Amino acid sequence: MKKKVLLWIQAALCVLLFARLASVFLGIYLEGSAARAAGDVTARIFTREKLGQGLLRALPLLASNIAFLLCCLAAGLSGEKAGRPVLTRSLARDPSFFLMRPSAVGDSSRSSAVLRAALLVLAALLIIHGVFNGSLLDALYKAINICTECIGLG
């Protein structure tokens, strides 16, 4: 019973984080669109400053989500499928095969859960770094150019 309650709390925290980030991005978009509609042609919808302020508002929820995840990992909470044999999975269908491989020494489900949590934190940090160093706008401009070339508008 305790395990299910903790999993429900973790799911609720993830949904709240998603809703918070979605509201941040929607707010930035609506604010920038309103500025453009008011006649300011030079107004940019997404800027680093606006994105940084929005992400700072979502940071406490992200930190609580990560803290709760680490507490669950420390308590030994893992998914339902952690005890299943890994060799029955097809590599073509499941790319997480390499993260789920049991180790020869120690508790394999706990070590793979810690590895996945560390990779999640590292990915989040790299995404945040990419947003703040301007890579987000570069990727957006490249995507716009590719789409307009494919459709034939550019």
Image (spheres, rainbow, N blue to C red):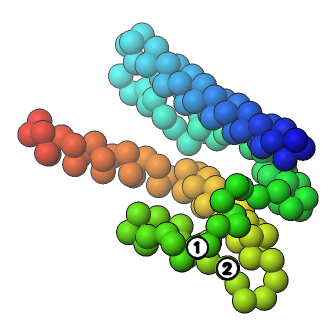
Indicate the quadrant where residue 86 lies. Answer: bottom right
Q: Position of residue 79 (x, y in %)?
A: 71, 56
Q: Position of residue 78 (x, y in %)?
A: 76, 58
- Between 80 and 122, which is closer to the camera in this rendering? 80
Q: Position of residue 123 (x, y in %)?
A: 61, 61
Can you say whether 137 is above or below 102 in the image?
Answer: above
In the displayed structure, does residue 3 sit left or right of residue 119? right
Instruction: Please report whichever mark, 2 or 1, sits nearer to the chain's N-terminal start.
Output: 1
Q: Is residue 80 visible?
A: yes
The circle on residue 86 is 1
Q: Position of residue 22 (x, y in %)?
A: 57, 30
In the displayed structure, does residue 153 sit left or right of residue 136? left
Q: Are marks 2 and 1 in contact (CB under 8 Å)?
A: yes
Q: Residues within 10 Å of mark 2 (few under 14, many from 20)?
A: some
The circle on residue 102 is 2
- Between 17 and 105, which is closer to the camera in this rendering? 105
